[in-house]
Amino acid sequence: MLMTSLISNLSVDCIIFGFDSGKLHVLLTKRELEDEVSGQILFTDYTVQGHHVLEGENIDDAARRVLKEKTGFDNIYLEQFHTFGNTDRIHQERDKLWIARKYPMVTNHVVSVGYCSLVDSTKVKPDTQHQFTSWFAVDELPLLGFDHGIMIEKALEFLRVKIQREPLVFELLPEKFTLSQLQNLYECILGVSLDRRNFRKKIGQMKFIIALNEKQKGVAHKPAQVYIFSRDVYDRTKKEKFDILT
C-alpha cells in the first residue's frame, strides 16, 4: 500500500557524519524561502536530514528512508541517540514562517527522534538531485534551522562515548587507511591529543586491524603502511569491553 499521509507531530532527523581533510563533517541541506509576491529571499539557513514519519511507517524505517534518499545507501550505520520533544522547538520566526508556508498541516509541537549515522564521505557526493545538500565541518557550521544545532551537539556527545566502546570509527574511513588517519580521526572526534607511540602499540595488539602488503599511493610524502578493519575478525575475537584509547 502506498503511504502518502504524514504524521503531523512525529518526525525523524538523521545526523549524518563524515570525515574528510582531517575534520569531522555533517551533511546539511540548504533551506531557502522566497516571498510569494516579490520573489525576494526571506531567509536562508541549513537543516539536518529529516522528514515526518508516514502513516503506517515504523520509525526506524522512516530513518532508513531519509538516509537512502540522501546518501543512496541502504546498509550503513544508523542508531537512535535521543528524542527531542520540547514544546518550544519551533520558536524562531523563520521556522514558524517555513512551516506555515510549506507544511501547514504540521502542529506546533513536533516530537523528533534523532538518529546518528556514519558514512565514508568520499562515497557520498551531493549531485544534481541533491544540489542543496553539502558537507560542513562541525566546527564551522552555518546558520541552522529549528533546534538542529542542539541535535548535532547531542549526536557528537553520543558518538564520543560510542567510539570508546565499539569500533564505529571505521564506518567513517575508506576501506583502506593509514594509522595516522585512524589516530587523526579519534583525536578529531574526541578533541584530545593521543600519544603516537602508545596509540600504535595499542593498534598492534588488535587482530582485527590488519596490515596489508601495500602502501599509500599518490602522496607527496613517504608512503605509509595501509591497513583494513576486519569486522569478521572483530566479531570472533572481541572482548567484553572495546578499548582502543587506554
Image (cartoon, helix red, strand yellow):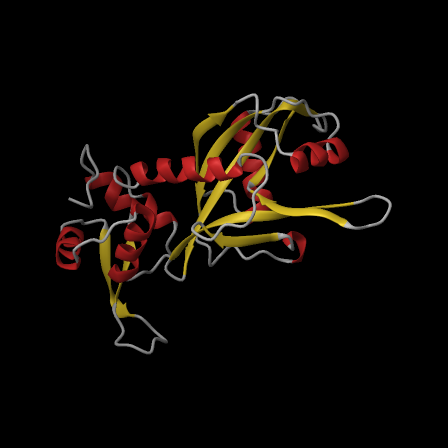
Query: Residue 54 sits in which quadrant?
Result: top right
Q: Position of residue 158 (x, y in %)?
A: 36, 35
- Name the one closer to the observer, 173 or 186: 186
* Numbered circles on residues, count: 0
Q: Position of residue 26 (x, y in %)?
A: 48, 48
Quadrant of the rendering where the N terminus is positioned: top right
Q: Residue at x 13, y 54 (%)?
A: 198
Q: Residue at x 48, y 35 (%)?
A: 151
Query: Residue 181 sits in which quadrant?
Result: bottom left
Quadrant of the rendering where the C terminus is positioned: top left
Residue furthest bottom in the image: 220
Q: Position of residue 175 (x, y in %)?
A: 36, 57
Decide if residue 6 is on the left or right side of residue 65: right
Can residue 171 be spotted in the picture?
Answer: yes
Q: Position of residue 50 (x, y in %)?
A: 58, 37
Can residue 31 be spotted in the picture?
Answer: no
Query: Residue 95 sits in which quadrant?
Result: top right
Check the image and report above or below for 187 versus 14.
below
Check the image and report above or below for 20 versus 215.
above
- Name the one closer to the observer, 55 or 99: 99
Residue furthest right in the image: 37
